[in-house]
Amino acid sequence: MTDSFMQNHQSALDNQMEDNAIQDLQNAGIYPDPDNDDILERLFEEAYDEIKENNILQLDEDGIVFAAKTRAERRFEELPEPGDYDD
């Protein structure tokens, strides 16, 4: 009886386990949701701090903000997509 239950429901159980694992990674900020503004904002803040600290081009505030926004967007796009991980 257990075998027929598992045979009929294993796919659904596997999908639920995968969804739970993805949700855990999203909650940790490792596997971002493409619409997750919090992660993009964190990347912007990190980029802003880096550029402001190492401002060898002597950018004004608008230049720093533009450069940080560009860097944050590039880093956001480089984050792994769902299923883009190596075992």
Image: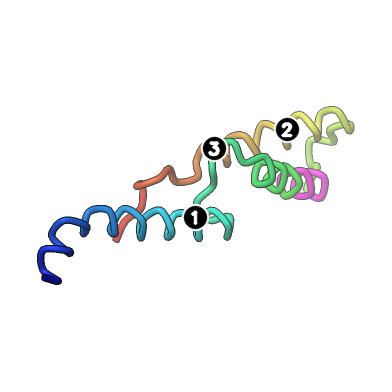
Image quarter in which the N terminus is found: bottom left
**Between marks 2 and 1, how big is the CA–CA gap?**
31 Å
Q: Which mark is residue 67?
A: 2
Q: Which type of secondary structure does the marked residue at label 3 adopt?
A: loop
Looking at the picture, tell me which residue is in the foreground, 73 or 16. Answer: 16
Q: Which type of secondary structure does the marked residue at label 1 adopt?
A: helix
> Which of the 4 image quadrants contains residue 11?
bottom left
- Residue that sits furthest to the front in the current view: 1
Q: Which SS does the magenta portion mostly show? A: helix
Asked if residue 57 lies left or right of residue 5, the reply is right
Q: Amino acid at mark 2?
A: Ala
Looking at the picture, tell me which residue is in the foreground, 57 or 1. Answer: 1
Q: Position of residue 37 (x, y in %)?
A: 67, 39
First reached walking from the N terminus: tag 2 or tag 1:
1
Q: What's the residue at 71%, 33% (across, down)? A: 69
**Between marks 2 and 3, how big is the CA–CA gap?**
21 Å
Residue holding disc 3: 34
**Which residue range is magenta in the image?**
47-53
Q: What's the residue at 54%, 43% (across, down)? A: 33
